[in-house]
Amino acid sequence: MVLAELGASLRDSLRKLNSGVSVSEEQVQEVLNDISRALIEADVSVKLVQEMKNKIKVTLATAGDSSMNKKKLVQKAVQDELVSLLEPATKPYQMSRKKPNVLLFVGLQGAGKTTTIAKFAGYYARKGWKVSMVCCDSFRAGAFDQLKQNATKLRIPFYGSYTEADPVLIAEKGVAQFRKEKYEIILIDTSGRHKQESGLFEEMQEISAAVRPNSTVFVMDGTQGQAVYDQAAGFHDAVDVGSVIVTKLDGHAKGGGALSAVAATQSPIIFLGTGEHFDDFEPFKARSFVSKLLGYGDMRGHMEAIKEVRNSDGTKELEANMRKGKFTLRNFFTTMENMNKVGPLSKMMGGMGSMGGGKDIKNFKFMMDSMKDEELDGFVDLSLRTPERNKRVLRIAKGSGCHPAMVENMLHMYNAQKPMLQKMKGALDPKAQKQAEH
Ligand code: GDP
């Protein structure tokens, strides 16, 4: 988890309130001092911490003899104040599926811009958006190759040039091409360095004026703690930053400082970079983040995922089939997809392992797309290795771009699950469900 140490200290401090039946003034004071110390150790500015402490004290004093028990009151006040520390009033740009969303990525060289663009592209491509990337960093040798390599790995179209030296021209051409081709998201990578320091902001402004992005995303290195404030404020003023992505927060003790400093510039943080791999990328929502930090679990996010899963057409069909004791390949894909959506909950509860991860789901989707309805809906038996069935497996492998062994593996998983799911027929009986709840 990001900021694991800070989380552990905060939880330890709050746990101290558990011991007594009633909570004394001294205990509250001690807990607030502990929390302040932990935040300062995570490099949150002393001034912000002091302000937060005072606000919590005021909340507690004005609550009077509230019916809410004092321990809960302290916990809630701490939680609310941490959220407001990390949540700027400004809302980030919301992408719309009805038009091209052009996003200009800016940030200093080495901050992790190119890596972040790849993560961002992968994140939305997985959600089914049509994504493209433009590299207009003509300053750093190898910048275009790096973006090209990432794009190829992610199977995302890209635009760039080895010969054109003018970044504005490259940006214009790239964006025009992808707009014409109706891409929903167009990501522009800019240079993070310039011959002269002041030239960097000028170049960004010129590119911005030429392509008129819907929003500018500032990528910054989170390892410097609160020292990032000046940089964040500088970019915020120079290029109208719409949102921020803070990188390199994997296990870094100063992350709390970086996050609160960025929030203090009134720029909303949208994602956190938590490692070098494309999957090391987390959407940032202050309330969920704080809940996780304090160990309360991100219940709101999970409840939303569960609701979404419950109401989907796939789940309804799965339940209808299960009532009849049926479990088809189409139903199997739905269970895999659902598991992936509510995955974080199962991960949090310590189960599941790696099966059905993002990569598997993607391959399953490709396989499913190259299967015929008769196969998906259980009218063809794919469990016995007859020559006709083997031909089908080869066709699915070819159509999906997956190795035949992967198709076999998927069928193996399906066949292993089938008897289990078929036996659950009774569990869907409303009466049985009621009993289980009691
Ligand atoms: P750019 O110059 O801003 O485009 O930065 P790059 O994308 O080339 O990244 C610079 C270095 O930081 C590379 O070695 C990346 O692998 C690394 N990096 C980027 N994001 C993260 C992150 O979230 N965590 C870690 N640990 N490293 C990162």
Image (cartoon, rainbow, N blue to C red):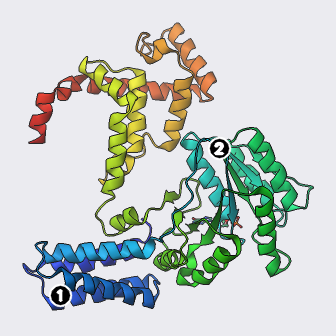
Residue labelled 1 has its Cβ within 8 Å of some atom of ligand 1: no
Q: Residues within 10 Å of mark 1 (few under 14, many from 20)?
A: some
Q: Is residue 26 above or below residue 274?
A: below
- Name the secondary structure under disc 2: loop
Task: Give the residue type at disc 1.
Answer: Gln
Q: Residues within 10 Å of mark 2 (few under 14, many from 20)?
A: few
The residue at which mark 1 appears reads as: 27
Residue 19: quarter of image = bottom left
Front residue (pair 192, 67): 67
Which residue is depicted at the point 11% across and 80% down?
A: 65
Task: Give the residue type at disc 2.
Answer: Lys
The residue at which mark 2 appears reads as: 99
Residue 58, how many percent across, how many down? 26, 86
Q: Is residue 97 above or below residue 330?
A: below
Mark 1–mark 2 Cα distance, whole angstroms, equals 55 Å
Residue 199, how many percent across, how many down? 83, 76
Whether residue 5 is visible to the viewer of this picture, yes or no, is no
User: In the image, which is nearer the foreground, mark 1 or mark 2?
Assistant: 2
Residue 218, how many percent across, how many down? 64, 67
